[in-house]
Amino acid sequence: QVQLVGSGGGLVQPGGSLRLSCAASGFAMGRYTIGWFRQAPGKEREGVLCITNGGGYTYYADSVKGRFTISRETAKRTVYLQMNSLKPDDTAVYYCATYLNGLLCPTAGAYDYWGQGTQVTVSS
């Protein structure tokens, strides 16, 4: 059974950092694309970053370039989203998802499985 478990969210002050984790089970996570998405209250879901099986990455959101990075630790079956210089606009529920292809980063609708969200709140 494919399962993705997101964790690491919390309350952080503007300018702070958080690292989100997406732990995978039930499939060979290292072979497939993992993406991070977010949804703020009253807003549509937005793509953040994704990583392919070869380690290539794509920024879905220009607003996080230079602040967020994505990495994969295959031995731990985990993908991380490192978020630095956080802003109040980054406040959202963050979700990880997997696309069972691995060679590219598709649009959100193409992802096959989703994890539960983890809340990130950026506030002073």
Image (spheres, helix red, strand yellow):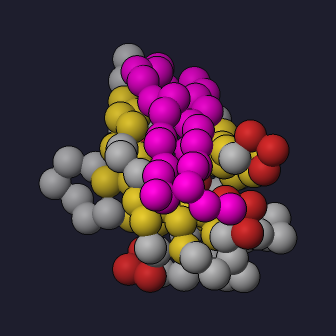
Q: Is residue 37 visible?
A: no
Residue shown at 49%/50% (left/top)?
4
In the rendered image, which quarter is residue 22 located in? Answer: top right
The residue lying at 47 percent from left, 20 percent from top is 13
Q: Position of residue 59 (x, y in %)?
A: 62, 67
Above or below for 113 versus 122: below
**Does 52 sit left or right of 92 as displayed?**
right
- Left or right: residue 41 versus residue 79 is left
**Relative to residue 116, is residue 5 drawn left or right?**
right
Percent x, y of residue 118: 39, 37
At x 54% / y 81%, what residue is drawn?
106
Q: Quadrant of residue 75?
A: top right
Q: Which residues are magenta?
A: 1-28
- In the picture as drawn, the residue positioned furthest to the left comes out as 42
Report the residue at 64% width, 69% height from top: 33
In the rendered view, tell whether residue 73 sits above or below residue 50.
above
Q: Position of residue 26 (x, y in %)?
A: 56, 55
Is residue 9 in the magenta section? yes
